């Protein structure tokens, strides 16, 4: 799951997956903006058929946190 989420972020942020660290706070990436947020939410819905509520997403800090959240749902 973690590698899938890294690949998802790499695709959306147009980065190489090797540039992303699971412990990175994704909101600190220069490429992170409201469009990236919407793209992540939409891709998770498309791939995993799960919508993360906005207030829950705000609590997620790192790429690994997001992978763990999805694994537990």
Image: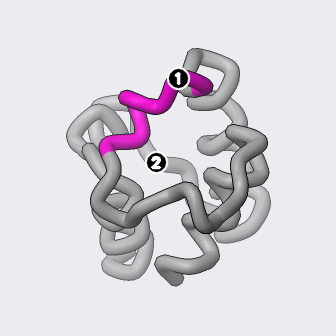
Q: Tell me whether circle 1 and circle 2 mark residues in contact (CB < 8 Å).
A: no
Residue in view at x 60 percent, y 67 percent: 18
- Residue, disc 1: 30
Residue in view at x 57 percent, y 66 percent: 5
* In the image, residue 3 above or below residue 45: below
Q: Position of residue 6 (x, y in %)?
A: 57, 65
**Front position in the image: 72 or 12:** 12
Quadrant for the C terminus, please.
bottom left
Residue in view at x 21 percent, y 40 percent: 59
Residue 48, image quadrant:
bottom right
Question: Is residue 28 toward the left or the right of residue 12 in the image?
Answer: left
In this view, the residue farthest toward the front is 19
- Residue, disc 2: 52
Give the residues in magenta. Answer: 25-31
Foreground mark, 1 or 2? 1
Residue in view at x 42 percent, y 70 percent: 67
- Counting residues from the N terminus, which is met first, the one under dot 1 or under dot 2? 1
């Amino acid at each position: 799951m973690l590698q899938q989420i890294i690949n998802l972020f790499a695709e959306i942020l147009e980065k190489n997956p090797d540039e992303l660290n699971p412990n990175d706070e994704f909101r600190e990436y220069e490429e992170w903006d409201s469009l990236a947020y919407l793209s992540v939410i939409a891709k998770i819905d498309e791939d995993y058929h799960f919508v993360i509520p906005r207030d829950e997403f705000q609590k997620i800090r790192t790429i690994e946190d997001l992978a763990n959240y999805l694994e537990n749902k």
